Structures are given as structure tokens and as C-alpha cells.
């Protein structure tokens, strides 16, 4: 292995961590224009580094691939940190929702570029109608007390199935009207122009995240009643079930374009640095604002002591479900961004071993630390998946698989030396918790004292 490549990789990793620190520092500035200019500058710096300047490119195609993977992994890991680090619910299902988001968004854009709008129509109307059904059923159930969880789950499931059925009928009805405007992959129509594809991509990512969130709501409603350990086992089973459905997507499920275990090809590569940066920043801002709100404090209180939180009037079950749904939403968005960068989806990517990746990242960075999760996500991809894989590949064709041995050894050493993670509770800039100052209590004069002074 060349010494120049090794030194260059280390410099890039240090530069990326400094870049993340600067970005979070700028977002913490009180002046709004400073924030806007700082974010635009942060975007522009990387965009310039990715640009080919007549044969010279600061970040190569290999580096850009790692960068997009790091952005997607950041979203997935932040979602898991919300579930496990901040809410205290041990989950191994994050990778399953990551796969759901990836395949959902990929199917939407794949069908669209091939003259079929049913993917976008069915998923779009399905998520909207499904969300409305879940909301109104929830409001109706609040009128009653002591409704069993399984009874509520049955009503929610019936509402979701009815919404999906209506969405399928709407998609089949509207698709013939849009087919002439779509054209085909070889002869694209008006709705397949580059600008229209960018809009479709944005909608596909959002709908994929919402679909993953709705699935997590239906799954989490009965399962979250279990203890943390049993919940972890149930979510692991969910990930395995999702992976089996991916392998048999062209037989059990009516999606021949996914090609089952052979892998889905032909996915349009629509992920650019703009979209990866945009969605990553959106996830960071949403999660930060959620954590620092009263709802976020309720979520954290459930982690600290469920009995005390319930005694203070906090809806423990609702806080658990909210954290699980929002975390799954982030995973779905990350999967959608990843699918349109790589252009190919294989069920092997979402297998059992890979499902531990976000968990290891969260533990490395520090449970309950957004900064640690973000830094560990980029460090994980650029060092372990990038530098270490290239380094091991120099030792033989089978050597890269040794990284699966190094991961648990490194994790074990971390647990022994620094169990709170690399950054622990440290937060950078924008992610720092605001100091809650005690409320000033004004002294009100007694009426008799005021009268005597007069």
C-alpha cells in the first residue's frame, strides 16, 4: 500500500471531522444570515472538492461514494440513537426500515423512468391515506379507556389495509392518463425531463420515509409493550423477515422489477451532493429540535425511569412509539438516498450481519450524543469501510473479510476503556443543549404593607 494514499486518507478523515465541527459551529451562531451563508459555504466547499478540474479532483469518485454512504449512515444511526440512546429501547430493526426505504424509493423512480407512474401514485396516495387513517383512528380510540393494545392494533391494521386498497385503485385509474407524458426510458416524455425527475426523486425519498414510519407504527404498537430485551429480539426478527421478503420480492410479492435475490438493477442514480447534504441536514435539524423540546425531554425521561416518568403524567407508551416512528422515518430517508447513489440493491446488503452496523456506530459515538453519532458515522465509513478495506485488500483477496473480526474486537476494547463512547455526552455547536435558567419569581407586595407605606 502506498504511503501517500495512507497519509492522504488520514488527512481526509481529519478534514471531514473538522468540517463537521465547523458546520455545527456555524449553525449555532445567533445571526440568521451567518447561519445561511455558513451552510451554503459548507455545501459549496464539498461541491468544489467533488468537481473535476481538468483531471484534478480533490475528492475522487471513491471518496464521493464514501461521502454519500456516510450521509446515509448518519441518518440511519441518528434514528437509532433516538430510539436506543435517547429513549432507551434496544432495537435491531433499524436496518430493516433502511431497506424498506431503499426499495420503496427505488421502485418509484424505476417505474417512473420506464413509463409507469403507479409506483409514485400508489405509494403517495397510500402513505397519505394511511397516515390520515391512523390519525383519525387514534383520535377515535382516545374517547375510550382501557382499550387493549391488540384491539387497537387490529383497527389500525384494517385502516391501513383499506387505505392501501384505495391507493391501488387510484394508481391504476390515473396511470393511463400519465403514460403518454412519461414515455419510456429510451424515449422520455415531458414528465421524464431532468427537472421532473428531481421532483419525483424528492417525493420518492419523502414517501419512502413516511412509508417506513407507518410500518414501524404498526409493528411497534404491539411490540413496544414488551421489555427492552424482548423488544430487541422482536426487531431482529423483523429485520430478518424484511430481508426474506426482499429475496422473494419477485415471487411472493408482486414486484418482478426487484428481481428478488438477484438484486434490483436499473435504479436511476439521482443522488447528488445537494440531495445528500439537504436530507442529512434536515434530519439533524429535526432531531435536534425534537430532543430539545418538551416532547424530547419526555422521551429522555422514559429512558431514565419509566415509573417516575409515568408518575409525572408522561405518556410512556406514546413516547416510546413516537421515538420508534421518527427513528424509522430517518432510516427510510437514508435508505432512499443510498439506493439512488448506488444504483443497485441486493438483499445481501440488508442482511443479518449488516444490521449491527448502526448499533456499533451509536455505541462508538456515545449513546445519547448526536455529535458522537455524526462523527462516528463518517469515521466508520471513511476509516473502516474505506481505508481499512483498501489496506486489507493489499494482503489478499479474502483479507477484507477480516474487518468483521476487527469490528467486534474494537467494540469490546471501547467498552472496557471508555464505555460512554468516544464523545460521551459532548455536543458540538448547534447540538449543545441550551441551559435552562431558573425562572425569576417577582416579590408581590402584600396589600396591608402597601397600604401602610401609603
Image (cartoon, helix red, strand yellow):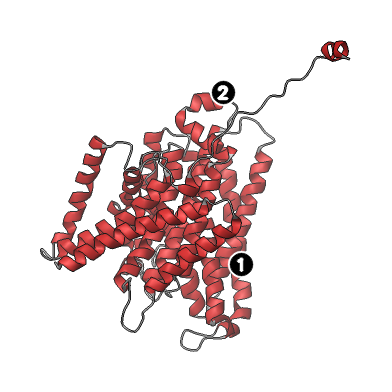
Of residue 335 and residue 264, the one placed in the foreground of this image is 335
Residue 87: image x %, image y %? 46, 38
Picture disc at residue 441: none
Write down the residue under mark 2: 311
Distance (Cα) linking label 2 and label 1: 47 Å
Q: Can see residue 103?
A: no
Q: Quadrant of residue 248?
A: bottom left
Q: Earlier in the sequence, mark 2 or mark 1?
A: 1
User: Dot 2 lies on which element?
Assistant: helix
Of residue 352 and residue 30, the one placed in the foreground of this image is 30
Q: Can see residue 396?
A: yes
Residue 300: image x %, image y %? 49, 35
Q: In this rendering, is residue 353 above or below 348?
A: above
**Residue drawn at (45%, 39%) of the image:** 86
Decide if residue 205 is on the left or right side of residue 167.
left
Quadrant, the N terminus: bottom left
Specify the farthest residue to the front.
453
Give neighbour class at mark 2: few <14, some 14-19, many 20+ (Cα, 10 Å): few
Write down the residue under mark 1: 169
Decide if residue 452 is on the left or right side of residue 233.
right
Front position among marks 2 and 1: 2
Q: Do the residues labelled 2 and 1 touch (CB within 8 Å)?
A: no
Amino acid at each position: 500500500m502506498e504511503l501517500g494514499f495512507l497519509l492522504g486518507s488520514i488527512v481526509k478523515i481529519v478534514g471531514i471531522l473538522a468540517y463537521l465541527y465547523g458546520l455545527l459551529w456555524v449553525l449555532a451562531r445567533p445571526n440568521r444570515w451567518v447561519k445561511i451563508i455558513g451552510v451554503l459555504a459548507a455545501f459549496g466547499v464539498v461541491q468544489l472538492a467533488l468537481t473535476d478540474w481538468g483531471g484534478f479532483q480533490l475528492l475522487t469518485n471513491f471518496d464521493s461514494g464514501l461521502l454519500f454512504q456516510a450521509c446515509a449512515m448518519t441518518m440511519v444511526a441518528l434514528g437509532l440513537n433516538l430510539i436506543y440512546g435517547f429513549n432507551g429501547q434496544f432495537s435491531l430493526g433499524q436496518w430493516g426500515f433502511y431497506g424498506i426505504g431503499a426499495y420503496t424509493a427505488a421502485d418509484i423512480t424505476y417505474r417512473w423512468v420506464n413509463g409507469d407512474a403507479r409506483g409514485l401514485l400508489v405509494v403517495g396516495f397510500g402513505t397519505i391515506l394511511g397516515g390520515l387513517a391512523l390519525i383519525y383512528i387514534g383520535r377515535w380510540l382516545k374517547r375510550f379507556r382501557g382499550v387493549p393494545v391488540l384491539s387497537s392494533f387490529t383497527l389500525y391494521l384494517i385502516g391501513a389495509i383499506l387505505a392501501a386498497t384505495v391507493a391501488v385503485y387510484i394508481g391504476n385509474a390515473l396511470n393511463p392518463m400519465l403514460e403518454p407524458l412519461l414515455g419510456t426510458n429510451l424515449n422520455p416524455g415531458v414528465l421524464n425531463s431532468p427537472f421532473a425527475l428531481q421532483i419525483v426523486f424528492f417525493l420518492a425519498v419523502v414517501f419512502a420515509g413516511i412509508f417506513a414510519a407507518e410500518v414501524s407504527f404498526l409493528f411497534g404498537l404491539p411490540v413496544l409493550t414488551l421489555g427492552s430485551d424482548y423488544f430487541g429480539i422482536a426487531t431482529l426478527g423483523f429485520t430478518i423477515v424484511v430481508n426474506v421478503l426482499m429475496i422473494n420480492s419477485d415471487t411472493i410479492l408482486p414486484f418482478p422489477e426487484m428481481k428478488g435475490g438477484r438484486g434490483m438493477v436499473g435504479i436511476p442514480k439521482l443522488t447528488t451532493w445537494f440531495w445528500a447534504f439537504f436530507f442529512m441536514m434536515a434530519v439533524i435539524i429535526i432531531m435536534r429540535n425534537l430532543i430539545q423540546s418538551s416532547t424530547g425531554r419526555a422521551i429522555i425521561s422514559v429512558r431514565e425511569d419509566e415509573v417516575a416518568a409515568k408518575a409525572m403524567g408522561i405518556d410512556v407508551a406514546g413516547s416510546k412509539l413516537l421515538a420508534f416512528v421518527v427513528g424509522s422515518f430517518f432510516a427510510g430517508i437514508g435508505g432512499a438516498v443510498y439506493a439512488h447513489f448506488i444504483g443497485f440493491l441486493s438483499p445481501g446488503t440488508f442482511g443479518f450481519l449488516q444490521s449491527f452496523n448502526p448499533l456499533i456506530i451509536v455505541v462508538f459515538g456515545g449513546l445519547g450524543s448526536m455529535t458522537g453519532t455524526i462523527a462516528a458515522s463518517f469515521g466508520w465509513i471513511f476509516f473502516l469501510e474505506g481505508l481499512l478495506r483498501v489496506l486489507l485488500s493489499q494482503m489478499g483477496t479474502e483479507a477484507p473479510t477480516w474487518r468483521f473480526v476487527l469490528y467486534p474486537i474494537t467494540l469490546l476494547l471501547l467498552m472496557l476503556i471508555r464505555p460512554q463512547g468516544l464523545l460521551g455526552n459532548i455536543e458540538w455547536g448547534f447540538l449543545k443543549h441550551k441551559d435552562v435558567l431558573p425562572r425569576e419569581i417577582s416579590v408581590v407586595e402584600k396589600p396591608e404593607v402597601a397600604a401602610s407605606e401609603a
